[in-house]
Amino acid sequence: MKEAKLFLIWIIFSMPGRLGVWLRNMYLRSRLSQFGDNISTEAFTEFLGGDTMSIGSGTSIRRFCSIVATSGGQLKIGDRVCINSNTTVNAADGGRILIGDDVIIAQNVVIRASDHVFSDTSKPISAQGHKGGYIEIGAGSWIGANVVIVKNVRIGKNVVVGAGSVVTKDIPDRTIAVGVPARVLKSIT
């Protein structure tokens, strides 16, 4: 019986077109704490978690994304957010992610709000667990392609993070940040 249920879920999440979007949205509406109106969830996107995840109205999540809020994690995606293909938004292991309204996230972005613990040198890192943190992305921001955002950072409102950047510290409102690690290049007036 468990295999039949998993097979049905696989069919729902791999079905293309309007019927696929409708089936995914019906399934997610029954599982998530909040699921807004007019949401587009494309095929082959993975959603792990449920009652600690919310997605706002008008949001678009493209193919091959991984959207996760498990093991004590919390994820809130605002209204009119666009998450492009092959992006990971991971609030697992006690992590907390808040994405504001009208945020654009380009393809191949990694947003991860927890890290492996590696303080005990007598144990393998894989056996030491995780430590959660937070990530906040302010309203109206644009996260470029191939960006990595690590835990315990706040990206302000109306920020542009350039492609390929690694965000390791806070970025103030209305700025452009680029580089590894990302640094503020200039203010947007």
Image (spheres, rainbow, N blue to C red):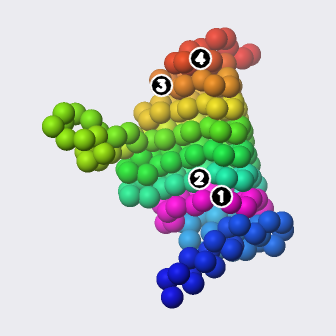
Q: Mark 2 sits on what residue?
A: 66
Residue 152: x and y, percent? 43, 33
Disc 1 residue type?
Thr
Q: Residues within 10 Å of mark 4 (few under 14, many from 20)?
A: some
Q: Which residues are magenta?
A: 38-56
- Amino acid under disc 2: Ser
Element at label 1: loop
Instruction: Answer left or right for 5 relative to 18.
Output: left
Disc number for residue 103: none
Circles 1 and 2: CB atoms closer than 8 Å? yes
Provide residue 35's location: percent of width, then percent of height: 64, 64
Q: CA distance from mark 3 to mark 1?
A: 27 Å
Residue type for callout 3: Thr
- Specify the label residue 179 is tagged with: 4
* Residue on which disc 1 sits: 45
Pointer 4 with pointer 2, Cβ within 8 A? no
| Cα–Cα span, label 4 and label 1 | 29 Å
Residue 168, label in figure: 3
